[in-house]
Image: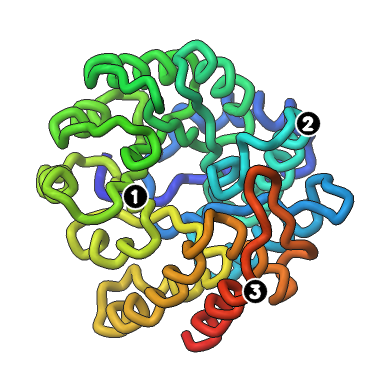
Amino acid sequence: MQGAQPFQIKHEAILNRGVKDFSLVLKQVFRDDRDMSLHGIHASLVTPFTRSGAVDAASLERLAVHCLENGVDGLVALGTTGEAALLAPDEERTVLEVCRAVSDRSGTPLIVGAGTMGTEDSIRQARERADFADALLVVVPYYLRPSDEAVVGHFAAVGAAVDVPLVPYNIPYRTGKQLSAETLLEILALDCVAGMKHCAGGIDADTLALLAANPGKAVLCGDDAYIYPMLRLGAAGGVAACACLAPSAYASMLGGTADALATHNKLLPMVEALFSEPAPAVLKACLAELGLIDDPAVRAPLRAPRPESVAAAVTAFQAL
């Protein structure tokens, strides 16, 4: 695999087919020869709800189109930002159908969240979502804190069960499982893995060792505040919730110029404000205030943010 090139998306001939037909043709026509590397900024989408509490498909489509038209390289659906764990199966399918259709029209990759704390359930979820995905974002098993060897085995088992590549999601401050750089490189070496979303909560020694090893597959920074420095250290891109609000600003950091550093510095107050309360509450409120989604609702146990948090985030965004 050479460098961090985008997915080779060839969906145009089957845009008007049903999802099941699409998945069959996709597998037969181009999945085997598709470039599975990743690059650039991938917007981690919120899941908008209507005032009655249903998934707002129209708002989701509007937001996804907004992100892609303003420079992001791909979308991420059913991640933590999308409140995936709080959705019913039929709601998950609505999200996937909307995001798949938008990605097909734009010719951009769709990464879909899948994975739980157990291997068997992660395989089930991965199989259910694989037909919609160009890659599956699979979190390190959380809470149980299995051995490093068991984590590698977990990803190998999930990858063997589906025919789309995995993007393992390393986020130790949420999973409770710290993985060494050596283990992260072992995971990246799996044939079923296309890249990794890495969220160390900072730039620690393992992050430096991981990037310095030049693993030959994409490392995507998942901490919105650290995307620019991670890019400078060799990351191929990032997965950013904040890119829903400021997609063009995040996309502009890919050049590594002095302007990119200035953009990074301008983004920091916005990022801090957006994450000042449990995400994605502030982000959804900002998106609603700007008309990108119709309603800011989040699902319990999340709560609506304080007005001052939203005001701070909007002010920071307007200062970009």
For the residue carrying disc 2, how many other residues have a C-alpha within 10 Å: few (<14), some (14-19), or many (20+)? few
Disc 2 residue type? Answer: Asp
Q: Which residue was labeled with disc 3? A: 307
Where's residue 291, x and y in %? 74, 73
**49 sits to left or right of 312:** right
Image marks 2 and 3: residues in contact by CB distance under 8 Å:
no
The residue depicted at 54 percent of the width and 79 percent of the height is: 312
Residue 218 seen in the current view = yes
Where's residue 25, x and y in %? 65, 28
Please identify, in this view, whether the residue under mark 1 or under mark 3 is nearer the observer: 3
For the residue carrying disc 3, how many other residues have a C-alpha within 10 Å: few (<14), some (14-19), or many (20+)? few
Q: Which residue was labeled with disc 2? A: 90
User: Residue 232 falls in which quadrant of the image?
Assistant: bottom left
**214 sits to left or right of 273:** left
In what element is the residue under mark 1?
strand
Mark 2 or mark 3, earlier in chain:
2
Q: Which residue was labeled with disc 1? A: 220
User: Residue 280 falls in which quadrant of the image?
Assistant: bottom right
Residue 292's tag is none
Q: CA distance from mark 2 to mark 3?
A: 32 Å
Query: Foreground residue, 39 or 305?
Result: 305
